[in-house]
Amino acid sequence: MSAPKKLFIKTYGCQMNVYDSERMAEALGGQGYVEAKTADDADMILLNTCHIREKAAEKVYSELGRMKRLKVAKPDLKIGVAGCVAQAEGEEIMRRQPAVDLVVGPQSYHRLPEMETKIRAGEKALDTDFPEEDKFEALKNRPKSKRGPTAFLTVQEGCDKFCAFCVVPYTRGAEVSRPADRILTETRELVERGVREITLLGQNVNAYHGAGANGDLTLAQLIWELNKIDGLARIRFTTSHPNDMTDDLIEAHGTCDKLMPYLHLPVQSGSDTILKRMNRSHTAESYLRVVEKIRAARPDILLSGDFIVGFPEETEADFQATMDLVEEVKYGTAYSFKYSTRPGTPAAERPQIDDIEASERLQRLQTLLSHQQREIQNSMVGREVGVLFEKPGRLEGQMGGKSDYLHAVHVDNCDKQVGDLARVRIVSSSTNSLAGELIR
Ligand code: SAH
Ligand code: SF4
Ligand code: F3S
């Protein structure tokens, strides 16, 4: 028998791409591919790409330039581009970089096995369809890769919201929810393979409305079903839109024991003028009202957010409104970006603001956000939290994991194993993590 071929996947972008990369590895597992540790070692390289900001997309081409050189030493090496850049740019990628053999979009990668056969025969392969069939179902009997105690699980894909700055509705397509029974089956199977924590994923995960036995389930109803699965200890979900934070989901944060006290709820801006131009269909006030309701249901919840600064025509007063909103909410973690013009989106047509001004605002916002992050992390000292251990720490006898609030925690002299969940008292806080001790 010939030696197995080796596949190297490099993943960019959001968690949904991480989930898709695992599925792509499974799709090609049936073709005799095993995982390569490095690109140099691979017979096939797949870049699973992100198109959200210009920098992310451009990175792909510089990476492809490097990969092309590997092909000189190894002419049989195949190079593929998957993900959102593949969807957005299609054939253009092969024109810009002729070393690319294959381009596959985020909705058609279950067809990778046929595409692989084609490129092995020396042809090029391109597929950026939005097919009718369910890609996850098509892959369900494929050989499964190894697993740690945490897993992502895509429950909803695509977006119908069309925020004026965003490419996702174009690259991922329309909003689709997976049927609830498939999610429950996949979760049970993950639990059998050692998973203790799942993070339900969707571009608008809280808009989930997947088919159940008695009609569609809301995300909250799905979470309650998952809550019944023995062996599953923790449930998280991301990313949520403020307008889809329904009362049943807010309530679940107060009553569902496996649902963790962490919520990523992007607002983008604190200025109503900008929110309107962004087509966000919520105001700063309505967002603050939602936050208030969530905190009433679960006072200790850790909130996370996304912000865009320097959106077209943003004034200093608009930016100040964002700073004020941040002051009011107090975020435990946050992601903030300078607006990036995306071809084909409505905001790209609007007057852009001065780049130096935008960078300066981003700096001010990030200073405030990291101050809040630090304060909230420091406030954990002295508290008792749950920790799910994910890997041994750097020191002998040390274990590392994540708290209920998703803080990195390490514990010295720890007799717990990977996958164990324990009560831990936090004793100190350093730059990127907390130190704790087991409560006996
Ligand atoms: N569906 C999620 C976010 C998807 S994209 C939501 O609606 O919240 C992740 C984040 O990237 C967004 O929340 C936004 O803050 C940022 N982003 C999206 N498009 C961008 C652009 N053109 N420039 C800068 N940041 C952008
Ligand atoms: Fe993009 Fe807006 Fe959809 Fe989020 S809700 S994916 S930001 S269009
Ligand atoms: Fe990027 Fe596509 Fe995710 S554009 S953020 S990889 S949905």
Image (spheres, helix red, strand yellow):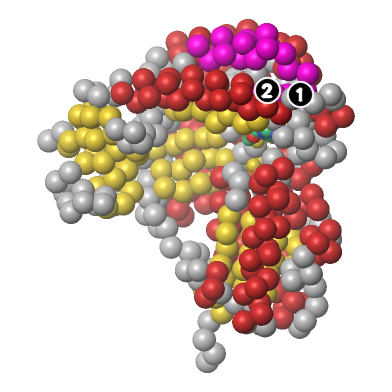
Q: Is residue 235 left or right of residue 273?
A: left
Q: Residue 431 appears in which quarter of the rendering?
A: top left
Q: Is residue 363 left or right of residue 297?
A: right
- In percent of width and height, residue 191 lies at 41, 51
The mark found on residue 353 in the picture is 1
Q: Name the amino acid, label 2.
A: Glu
Whether 95 is drawn above or below 171: the answer is below
Q: Is residue 315 left or right of residue 184?
A: right
Q: Residue 351 appears in which quarter of the rendering?
A: top right
- In percent of width and height, residue 23 lies at 59, 59
Q: Which of 134 and 106 lies nearest the eye of the viewer?
A: 106
Q: Quadrant of ligand 1?
A: top right
Q: Is residue 117 magenta?
A: no
- In percent of width and height, residue 18 lies at 56, 51
Would residue 111 be seen by someone viewing this image from the given angle? yes
Q: Residue furthest front?
A: 356
Q: Residue 45 appears in which quarter of the rendering?
A: bottom right
What number of labels is visible?
Answer: 2
Q: Is residue 326 magenta?
A: yes
Q: Name the amino acid, label 1.
A: Ile
Bounds of the magenta segment:
308-327
Residue neighbourhood size for the residue with mark 2, other residues' Cα within 10 Å, grouped as few (<14), some (14–19), many (≥20): some
Whether 102 is drawn above or below 370: the answer is below
Location of the C terminus (image quadrant): top left
Residue at image position (21%, 48%) is: 398
Whether pointer 1 and pointer 2 mark residues with C-beta atoms closer than 8 Å, the reply is yes
Q: Which residue is mark 2?
A: 357
- In percent of width and height, residue 362 lies at 60, 25
Q: Is mark 1 within 8 Å of ligand 1?
A: no
